[in-house]
Image (tube, rainbow, N blue to C red):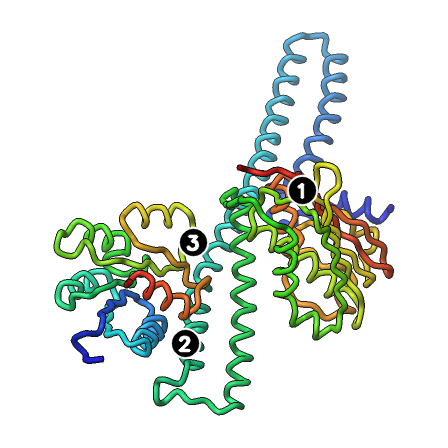
Amino acid sequence: MPEQEKKKILVIEDDRSLQNALVEIVHQEGFVSESALDGEEGLAKIKTFGPDLILLDIILPKKDGFEVLSEIKKDEAIKNIPVLILTNLEEVDNVQKALDLGATNYMVKSDFSLKDVVEKIRATMK
Amino acid sequence: MFWKFLDDVNFVSRCRKYNIGLWQCPNFLFLVMGLLTVAAMFGTFFVSKSFDDETVTIVSVTIVTTIIVTIGSLIIRGVERIAEANVMKNEFISIVSHQLCGPLSAIKWNMEVLEGDGSSDNLQLTPKQTVFLNNIKEANDKMLKLVGQLLEVNRIDEGRAIFKSENVDLGEIADQAISELKDIISEREIEIKKRIAPDLPLIFVDATGMKTVVRSLVSNAIKYSRQKGEVEVDLKSSGRKILLTVKDWGVGIPRYQHRKVFEKFFRSANEARYRTDGIGLGLYLARAIVENLGGKLWFESEAGKGSTFYVSLPIVQKK
Protein backbone atom coordinates (compact mmCIF):
# COMPACT_ATOMS: atom_id res chain seq x y z
CA MET A 1 0.00 0.00 0.00
CA PRO A 2 1.46 3.41 -0.90
CA GLU A 3 2.52 5.51 2.12
CA GLN A 4 0.00 8.30 1.52
CA GLU A 5 -2.98 5.90 1.59
CA LYS A 6 -2.07 4.37 4.92
CA LYS A 7 -4.11 5.46 7.91
CA LYS A 8 -2.31 7.62 10.43
CA ILE A 9 -2.20 6.98 14.16
CA LEU A 10 -0.87 9.32 16.84
CA VAL A 11 0.37 7.67 20.03
CA ILE A 12 0.39 9.98 23.06
CA GLU A 13 2.11 8.01 25.82
CA ASP A 14 4.81 9.11 28.25
CA ASP A 15 6.16 5.67 29.03
CA ARG A 16 8.77 5.02 26.35
CA SER A 17 8.65 1.25 26.64
CA LEU A 18 4.90 1.20 26.13
CA GLN A 19 5.15 3.74 23.36
CA ASN A 20 7.80 1.69 21.52
CA ALA A 21 5.68 -1.43 21.65
CA LEU A 22 2.58 0.43 20.45
CA VAL A 23 4.42 2.13 17.59
CA GLU A 24 5.98 -1.15 16.49
CA ILE A 25 2.72 -3.08 16.45
CA VAL A 26 0.93 -0.26 14.68
CA HIS A 27 3.62 -0.30 11.96
CA GLN A 28 3.42 -4.07 11.65
CA GLU A 29 -0.29 -3.71 11.13
CA GLY A 30 0.28 -1.33 8.26
CA PHE A 31 -0.42 2.06 9.81
CA VAL A 32 1.75 5.16 9.78
CA SER A 33 2.36 6.61 13.20
CA GLU A 34 3.87 9.43 15.15
CA SER A 35 4.22 9.71 18.88
CA ALA A 36 4.27 12.29 21.62
CA LEU A 37 5.56 12.02 25.18
CA ASP A 38 3.34 14.64 26.82
CA GLY A 39 -0.02 16.31 26.44
CA GLU A 40 1.22 19.56 24.90
CA GLU A 41 3.40 17.81 22.35
CA GLY A 42 0.42 15.57 21.61
CA LEU A 43 -1.91 18.49 20.89
CA ALA A 44 0.71 20.13 18.66
CA LYS A 45 1.23 16.91 16.71
CA ILE A 46 -2.49 16.43 16.13
CA LYS A 47 -2.40 19.67 14.09
CA THR A 48 0.82 18.96 12.16
CA PHE A 49 0.41 15.20 11.63
CA GLY A 50 -3.35 15.08 11.09
CA PRO A 51 -3.98 11.57 12.47
CA ASP A 52 -6.99 9.40 11.63
CA LEU A 53 -7.01 8.04 15.17
CA ILE A 54 -5.43 8.98 18.50
CA LEU A 55 -4.22 6.62 21.24
CA LEU A 56 -4.20 8.66 24.42
CA ASP A 57 -2.81 7.95 27.89
CA ILE A 58 -4.37 9.72 30.89
CA ILE A 59 -1.48 10.36 33.24
CA LEU A 60 0.79 12.59 31.17
CA PRO A 61 3.20 15.41 31.93
CA LYS A 62 2.28 19.05 31.15
CA LYS A 63 -1.32 18.33 30.13
CA ASP A 64 -3.10 15.17 31.22
CA GLY A 65 -5.23 13.02 28.97
CA PHE A 66 -8.51 14.56 30.16
CA GLU A 67 -7.30 18.06 29.28
CA VAL A 68 -6.02 16.91 25.89
CA LEU A 69 -9.32 15.16 25.21
CA SER A 70 -11.45 18.17 26.10
CA GLU A 71 -9.27 20.46 23.95
CA ILE A 72 -9.63 18.09 21.02
CA LYS A 73 -13.40 18.08 21.41
CA LYS A 74 -13.53 21.89 21.61
CA ASP A 75 -11.65 22.34 18.33
CA GLU A 76 -13.97 22.08 15.31
CA ALA A 77 -11.12 21.05 12.99
CA ILE A 78 -10.08 17.98 14.95
CA LYS A 79 -13.03 17.07 17.13
CA ASN A 80 -14.15 14.20 14.92
CA ILE A 81 -10.91 12.24 15.18
CA PRO A 82 -11.65 9.12 17.24
CA VAL A 83 -9.74 8.95 20.53
CA LEU A 84 -8.98 5.63 22.22
CA ILE A 85 -7.96 5.98 25.86
CA LEU A 86 -5.20 3.63 27.00
CA THR A 87 -4.53 3.88 30.70
CA ASN A 88 -4.07 2.01 33.94
CA LEU A 89 -6.69 4.04 35.78
CA GLU A 90 -9.44 1.49 36.13
CA GLU A 91 -11.84 3.38 38.41
CA VAL A 92 -15.36 3.84 37.08
CA ASP A 93 -15.40 7.61 37.58
CA ASN A 94 -12.36 7.95 35.33
CA VAL A 95 -13.92 5.77 32.65
CA GLN A 96 -17.16 7.78 32.88
CA LYS A 97 -15.30 11.09 32.76
CA ALA A 98 -13.40 10.09 29.62
CA LEU A 99 -16.52 8.81 27.89
CA ASP A 100 -18.44 11.96 28.89
CA LEU A 101 -15.67 14.05 27.38
CA GLY A 102 -16.17 12.17 24.11
CA ALA A 103 -13.61 9.36 24.07
CA THR A 104 -14.51 6.61 21.60
CA ASN A 105 -13.27 3.80 23.81
CA TYR A 106 -11.54 3.21 27.12
CA MET A 107 -8.98 0.45 27.63
CA VAL A 108 -7.15 -0.53 30.80
CA LYS A 109 -3.62 -1.45 29.72
CA SER A 110 -3.10 -4.34 32.08
CA ASP A 111 -6.33 -6.00 30.92
CA PHE A 112 -5.56 -5.72 27.22
CA SER A 113 -3.04 -7.38 24.95
CA LEU A 114 -1.55 -5.53 21.98
CA LYS A 115 -3.72 -7.72 19.77
CA ASP A 116 -6.82 -6.42 21.56
CA VAL A 117 -5.63 -2.86 21.05
CA VAL A 118 -5.10 -3.45 17.34
CA GLU A 119 -8.56 -4.99 17.11
CA LYS A 120 -10.10 -1.92 18.74
CA ILE A 121 -8.16 0.34 16.37
CA ARG A 122 -9.44 -1.61 13.36
CA ALA A 123 -13.00 -1.66 14.68
CA THR A 124 -12.92 2.11 15.21
CA MET A 125 -11.43 2.82 11.76
CA LYS A 126 -14.19 0.96 9.93
CA MET B 1 -5.75 -22.19 77.05
CA PHE B 2 -3.94 -20.57 79.97
CA TRP B 3 -1.09 -19.45 77.72
CA LYS B 4 -3.52 -17.99 75.28
CA PHE B 5 -5.09 -16.02 78.13
CA LEU B 6 -1.66 -14.79 79.23
CA ASP B 7 -0.92 -13.79 75.66
CA ASP B 8 -4.22 -11.90 75.50
CA VAL B 9 -3.42 -9.82 78.58
CA ASN B 10 0.22 -9.29 77.66
CA PHE B 11 -0.42 -5.77 76.46
CA VAL B 12 3.26 -4.90 76.07
CA SER B 13 3.73 -7.50 73.35
CA ARG B 14 0.38 -6.52 71.80
CA CYS B 15 1.31 -2.85 71.68
CA ARG B 16 4.68 -3.71 70.22
CA LYS B 17 2.86 -5.75 67.57
CA TYR B 18 0.71 -2.74 66.67
CA ASN B 19 3.91 -0.72 66.50
CA ILE B 20 2.68 2.11 68.74
CA GLY B 21 3.88 3.56 72.02
CA LEU B 22 2.54 2.37 75.38
CA TRP B 23 0.65 5.61 76.03
CA GLN B 24 -1.03 5.40 72.64
CA CYS B 25 -1.95 1.76 72.99
CA PRO B 26 -5.64 1.11 73.82
CA ASN B 27 -4.89 -2.26 75.46
CA PHE B 28 -2.53 -0.67 78.00
CA LEU B 29 -4.61 2.45 78.55
CA PHE B 30 -7.73 0.41 79.20
CA LEU B 31 -5.93 -1.51 81.93
CA VAL B 32 -4.68 1.74 83.45
CA MET B 33 -8.18 3.13 83.39
CA GLY B 34 -9.56 0.01 85.09
CA LEU B 35 -6.98 0.08 87.88
CA LEU B 36 -7.48 3.79 88.32
CA THR B 37 -11.24 3.44 88.60
CA VAL B 38 -10.86 0.83 91.33
CA ALA B 39 -8.26 2.94 93.17
CA ALA B 40 -10.43 6.03 92.79
CA MET B 41 -13.45 4.29 94.26
CA PHE B 42 -11.51 3.19 97.31
CA GLY B 43 -9.86 6.61 97.54
CA THR B 44 -13.15 8.45 97.43
CA PHE B 45 -14.64 6.06 99.93
CA PHE B 46 -11.81 6.62 102.44
CA VAL B 47 -11.59 10.35 101.86
CA SER B 48 -15.31 10.83 102.40
CA LYS B 49 -15.13 8.62 105.44
CA SER B 50 -12.19 10.36 107.15
CA PHE B 51 -13.16 13.92 106.25
CA ASP B 52 -16.68 14.74 107.19
CA ASP B 53 -16.78 17.44 104.58
CA GLU B 54 -18.84 17.50 101.38
CA THR B 55 -16.40 19.78 99.54
CA VAL B 56 -13.55 17.29 99.89
CA THR B 57 -15.73 14.53 98.46
CA ILE B 58 -16.88 16.67 95.55
CA VAL B 59 -13.31 17.81 94.73
CA SER B 60 -11.90 14.28 94.85
CA VAL B 61 -14.70 12.89 92.66
CA THR B 62 -14.14 15.71 90.16
CA ILE B 63 -10.40 15.03 90.02
CA VAL B 64 -10.93 11.30 89.49
CA THR B 65 -13.53 11.87 86.78
CA THR B 66 -11.20 14.27 84.96
CA ILE B 67 -8.37 11.73 84.99
CA ILE B 68 -10.65 8.95 83.72
CA VAL B 69 -12.05 11.12 80.95
CA THR B 70 -8.49 12.09 79.93
CA ILE B 71 -7.42 8.47 79.70
CA GLY B 72 -10.62 7.70 77.81
CA SER B 73 -9.78 10.31 75.22
CA LEU B 74 -6.26 8.88 74.95
CA ILE B 75 -7.81 5.48 74.24
CA ILE B 76 -10.00 6.97 71.54
CA ARG B 77 -6.97 8.63 69.98
CA GLY B 78 -5.11 5.31 70.04
CA VAL B 79 -7.98 3.57 68.25
CA GLU B 80 -8.12 6.41 65.74
CA ARG B 81 -4.42 5.99 65.01
CA ILE B 82 -4.95 2.32 64.27
CA ALA B 83 -7.94 3.11 62.06
CA GLU B 84 -5.91 5.74 60.21
CA ALA B 85 -3.10 3.25 59.70
CA ASN B 86 -5.63 0.92 58.12
CA VAL B 87 -6.81 3.59 55.71
CA MET B 88 -3.18 4.41 54.86
CA LYS B 89 -2.45 0.73 54.25
CA ASN B 90 -5.32 0.54 51.76
CA GLU B 91 -4.11 3.67 50.01
CA PHE B 92 -0.58 2.31 49.95
CA ILE B 93 -1.69 -0.97 48.38
CA SER B 94 -3.74 0.92 45.84
CA ILE B 95 -0.88 3.24 44.85
CA VAL B 96 1.72 0.48 44.68
CA SER B 97 -0.56 -1.78 42.66
CA HIS B 98 -1.32 1.00 40.21
CA GLN B 99 2.33 1.84 39.86
CA LEU B 100 3.14 -1.83 39.25
CA CYS B 101 0.55 -2.03 36.49
CA GLY B 102 2.56 0.35 34.27
CA PRO B 103 5.82 -1.59 34.03
CA LEU B 104 3.99 -4.93 34.02
CA SER B 105 1.91 -3.89 31.00
CA ALA B 106 5.08 -2.58 29.35
CA ILE B 107 6.72 -6.00 29.78
CA LYS B 108 3.60 -7.74 28.48
CA TRP B 109 3.31 -5.58 25.37
CA ASN B 110 6.99 -5.61 24.49
CA MET B 111 6.98 -9.37 24.88
CA GLU B 112 4.08 -9.52 22.46
CA VAL B 113 6.06 -7.50 19.93
CA LEU B 114 9.02 -9.89 20.31
CA GLU B 115 6.75 -12.84 19.82
CA GLY B 116 5.21 -11.07 16.84
CA ASP B 117 4.00 -12.78 13.70
CA GLY B 118 7.42 -12.50 12.11
CA SER B 119 6.24 -9.89 9.64
CA SER B 120 8.87 -7.57 10.99
CA ASP B 121 12.25 -8.69 9.58
CA ASN B 122 14.47 -8.78 12.67
CA LEU B 123 12.09 -10.47 15.04
CA GLN B 124 12.60 -14.10 14.10
CA LEU B 125 13.15 -16.10 17.28
CA THR B 126 14.70 -19.53 17.55
CA PRO B 127 12.53 -22.26 19.14
CA LYS B 128 14.69 -22.14 22.26
CA GLN B 129 14.29 -18.39 22.58
CA THR B 130 10.55 -18.85 22.24
CA VAL B 131 10.55 -21.25 25.21
CA PHE B 132 12.27 -18.71 27.44
CA LEU B 133 10.14 -15.90 26.15
CA ASN B 134 7.07 -17.90 27.12
CA ASN B 135 8.50 -18.46 30.60
CA ILE B 136 8.89 -14.72 31.08
CA LYS B 137 5.41 -14.18 29.74
CA GLU B 138 3.89 -16.67 32.14
CA ALA B 139 5.71 -15.14 35.10
CA ASN B 140 4.57 -11.71 34.05
CA ASP B 141 0.96 -12.83 33.66
CA LYS B 142 1.08 -14.32 37.15
CA MET B 143 2.33 -11.02 38.50
CA LEU B 144 -0.39 -9.10 36.66
CA LYS B 145 -2.95 -11.45 38.15
CA LEU B 146 -1.63 -10.91 41.68
CA VAL B 147 -1.66 -7.15 41.26
CA GLY B 148 -5.15 -7.38 39.81
CA GLN B 149 -6.24 -9.34 42.87
CA LEU B 150 -4.76 -6.73 45.21
CA LEU B 151 -6.59 -3.98 43.35
CA GLU B 152 -9.84 -5.92 43.46
CA VAL B 153 -9.54 -6.52 47.21
CA ASN B 154 -8.82 -2.85 47.66
CA ARG B 155 -11.91 -1.89 45.69
CA ILE B 156 -14.04 -4.23 47.78
CA ASP B 157 -12.58 -2.97 51.07
CA GLU B 158 -13.30 0.60 50.09
CA GLY B 159 -16.76 -0.24 48.76
CA ARG B 160 -15.80 0.74 45.22
CA ALA B 161 -16.31 -2.66 43.63
CA ILE B 162 -18.72 -2.73 40.73
CA PHE B 163 -20.81 -5.73 39.89
CA LYS B 164 -22.45 -5.83 36.51
CA SER B 165 -25.17 -8.41 36.91
CA GLU B 166 -26.96 -10.07 34.03
CA ASN B 167 -28.83 -13.34 33.49
CA VAL B 168 -26.05 -15.89 33.59
CA ASP B 169 -25.74 -19.64 33.00
CA LEU B 170 -23.62 -20.72 35.98
CA GLY B 171 -22.84 -24.05 34.33
CA GLU B 172 -21.16 -22.24 31.49
CA ILE B 173 -19.26 -20.03 33.96
CA ALA B 174 -18.05 -23.12 35.82
CA ASP B 175 -16.88 -24.68 32.54
CA GLN B 176 -14.95 -21.54 31.64
CA ALA B 177 -13.39 -21.24 35.08
CA ILE B 178 -12.30 -24.88 35.06
CA SER B 179 -10.86 -24.65 31.57
CA GLU B 180 -8.78 -21.65 32.68
CA LEU B 181 -7.21 -23.98 35.24
CA LYS B 182 -6.31 -26.69 32.74
CA ASP B 183 -2.54 -26.17 33.17
CA ILE B 184 -2.51 -26.78 36.92
CA ILE B 185 -5.06 -29.60 36.52
CA SER B 186 -2.80 -31.49 34.15
CA GLU B 187 0.35 -30.61 36.09
CA ARG B 188 -1.06 -32.10 39.29
CA GLU B 189 -2.89 -34.84 37.40
CA ILE B 190 -6.19 -34.05 39.07
CA GLU B 191 -9.42 -35.59 37.91
CA ILE B 192 -12.23 -33.05 37.93
CA LYS B 193 -15.61 -34.70 38.36
CA LYS B 194 -18.11 -32.20 37.08
CA ARG B 195 -21.80 -32.65 37.70
CA ILE B 196 -23.89 -29.84 36.38
CA ALA B 197 -27.65 -30.26 36.59
CA PRO B 198 -29.15 -30.01 33.08
CA ASP B 199 -32.16 -27.96 34.16
CA LEU B 200 -30.16 -25.24 35.87
CA PRO B 201 -32.03 -21.92 35.67
CA LEU B 202 -30.27 -18.70 34.67
CA ILE B 203 -29.53 -16.36 37.56
CA PHE B 204 -28.93 -12.65 37.78
CA VAL B 205 -25.29 -12.26 38.87
CA ASP B 206 -22.01 -10.71 37.79
CA ALA B 207 -20.40 -13.19 35.39
CA THR B 208 -16.79 -12.08 35.90
CA GLY B 209 -17.20 -12.11 39.66
CA MET B 210 -18.75 -15.57 39.69
CA LYS B 211 -15.99 -16.88 37.45
CA THR B 212 -13.47 -15.57 39.98
CA VAL B 213 -15.36 -17.36 42.75
CA VAL B 214 -15.49 -20.73 40.96
CA ARG B 215 -11.88 -20.45 39.83
CA SER B 216 -10.71 -19.64 43.31
CA LEU B 217 -12.62 -22.53 44.95
CA VAL B 218 -11.58 -25.09 42.34
CA SER B 219 -7.96 -23.96 42.27
CA ASN B 220 -7.79 -24.20 46.06
CA ALA B 221 -9.27 -27.69 45.91
CA ILE B 222 -6.61 -28.64 43.36
CA LYS B 223 -3.74 -27.03 45.26
CA TYR B 224 -4.58 -28.82 48.49
CA SER B 225 -5.29 -32.16 46.85
CA ARG B 226 -2.66 -34.83 46.60
CA GLN B 227 -1.04 -35.51 43.25
CA LYS B 228 -3.49 -37.50 41.08
CA GLY B 229 -6.32 -36.56 43.42
CA GLU B 230 -9.95 -35.96 42.64
CA VAL B 231 -12.01 -32.79 42.83
CA GLU B 232 -15.77 -32.79 42.60
CA VAL B 233 -17.66 -29.79 41.24
CA ASP B 234 -21.39 -30.02 41.69
CA LEU B 235 -23.94 -27.49 40.52
CA LYS B 236 -27.65 -27.91 41.11
CA SER B 237 -30.73 -26.00 42.10
CA SER B 238 -32.40 -26.73 45.38
CA GLY B 239 -35.57 -24.88 46.22
CA ARG B 240 -35.16 -21.23 45.30
CA LYS B 241 -31.38 -21.39 45.41
CA ILE B 242 -28.55 -22.60 43.26
CA LEU B 243 -26.00 -24.60 45.19
CA LEU B 244 -22.39 -24.95 44.06
CA THR B 245 -20.29 -27.55 45.84
CA VAL B 246 -16.54 -27.96 45.41
CA LYS B 247 -15.18 -31.00 47.21
CA ASP B 248 -11.67 -32.34 47.58
CA TRP B 249 -10.05 -35.19 49.49
CA GLY B 250 -6.82 -33.31 50.16
CA VAL B 251 -5.05 -32.03 53.26
CA GLY B 252 -8.07 -30.27 54.76
CA ILE B 253 -8.01 -27.39 57.21
CA PRO B 254 -7.30 -28.05 60.92
CA ARG B 255 -10.25 -27.12 63.13
CA TYR B 256 -8.44 -24.38 65.05
CA GLN B 257 -7.96 -22.49 61.79
CA HIS B 258 -11.55 -22.69 60.63
CA ARG B 259 -12.58 -19.24 61.74
CA LYS B 260 -9.60 -17.67 59.97
CA VAL B 261 -10.19 -19.19 56.55
CA PHE B 262 -11.91 -16.14 55.07
CA GLU B 263 -9.47 -13.63 56.53
CA LYS B 264 -7.22 -11.67 54.24
CA PHE B 265 -3.80 -13.23 53.62
CA PHE B 266 -4.81 -16.47 55.35
CA ARG B 267 -2.65 -19.48 54.47
CA SER B 268 -3.44 -22.86 55.93
CA ALA B 269 -0.96 -24.43 58.36
CA ASN B 270 -0.69 -27.31 55.91
CA GLU B 271 0.59 -24.87 53.38
CA ALA B 272 4.23 -25.76 53.91
CA ARG B 273 3.65 -29.39 53.01
CA TYR B 274 2.19 -28.52 49.67
CA ARG B 275 3.77 -26.24 47.17
CA THR B 276 1.29 -23.53 46.29
CA ASP B 277 1.43 -19.97 45.13
CA GLY B 278 -0.91 -17.07 45.73
CA ILE B 279 -1.08 -14.58 48.54
CA GLY B 280 -4.10 -15.78 50.47
CA LEU B 281 -6.66 -13.44 48.96
CA GLY B 282 -8.67 -15.93 46.92
CA LEU B 283 -11.21 -16.98 49.54
CA TYR B 284 -11.49 -13.51 51.03
CA LEU B 285 -12.31 -12.17 47.58
CA ALA B 286 -14.65 -15.08 46.77
CA ARG B 287 -16.70 -14.56 49.93
CA ALA B 288 -16.89 -10.80 49.38
CA ILE B 289 -18.11 -11.31 45.82
CA VAL B 290 -20.70 -13.94 46.79
CA GLU B 291 -22.03 -11.80 49.63
CA ASN B 292 -22.22 -8.77 47.36
CA LEU B 293 -24.35 -10.84 45.01
CA GLY B 294 -26.71 -11.77 47.83
CA GLY B 295 -25.40 -15.30 48.35
CA LYS B 296 -23.58 -17.29 51.00
CA LEU B 297 -20.21 -19.07 51.01
CA TRP B 298 -19.23 -21.60 53.69
CA PHE B 299 -17.26 -24.80 54.13
CA GLU B 300 -16.75 -28.01 56.01
CA SER B 301 -13.29 -29.39 56.48
CA GLU B 302 -11.32 -31.91 58.44
CA ALA B 303 -7.55 -32.07 58.58
CA GLY B 304 -6.24 -34.98 56.55
CA LYS B 305 -9.62 -35.76 55.00
CA GLY B 306 -10.37 -32.84 52.74
CA SER B 307 -12.64 -29.84 52.41
CA THR B 308 -15.99 -29.03 50.87
CA PHE B 309 -16.88 -25.47 49.97
CA TYR B 310 -20.47 -24.43 49.32
CA VAL B 311 -21.89 -21.41 47.55
CA SER B 312 -25.59 -20.77 47.55
CA LEU B 313 -27.10 -18.04 45.42
CA PRO B 314 -30.76 -17.02 45.32
CA ILE B 315 -32.43 -17.73 41.99
CA VAL B 316 -33.30 -14.27 40.77
CA GLN B 317 -33.77 -13.28 37.16
CA LYS B 318 -34.23 -10.00 35.49
CA LYS B 319 -36.42 -9.61 32.46
Instruction: State which chain disc 2 sits on.
Output: B
Q: Residues within 10 Å of mark 3 (few under 14, many from 20)?
A: some
On screen, residue B209 versus residue B119, left or right, reads right
Label 1 sits on what residue type?
Answer: Leu
What residue is shown with label 1? Answer: B313
Above or below for A3 versus B143: below
Q: Are marks 1 and 2 on the same chain?
A: yes
Which residue is drawn at the image coordinates 55% and 85% (left, top)?
A: B131
Instruction: State which chain disc 3 sits on.
Output: A
Which residue is drawn at the image coordinates 67% and 53% (left, top)?
A: B283
| Element at label 3 | loop
Instruction: State which chain disc 1 sits on.
Output: B
**Front tag of 1 and 2:** 1
Of the pair A39 and B17, the residue shown nearer to us: A39
Q: Are marks 1 and 3 on the same chain?
A: no
Q: Are marks 3 and 2 on the same chain?
A: no
The picture quadrant where one finds residue B225 is bottom right
Which residue is drawn at the image coordinates 79% and 72% (left, top)?
A: B227
| Element at label 1 | strand
Label 2 sits on what residue type?
Answer: Asn
Above or below for B35 versus B209: above
What residue is shown with label 2? Answer: B110
Which residue is drawn at the image coordinates 78% and 56% (left, top)?
A: B247
On screen, residue B15 versus residue A5, left or right, reads right
Q: Which mark is residue B199?
A: none
What residue is shown with label 3? Answer: A90
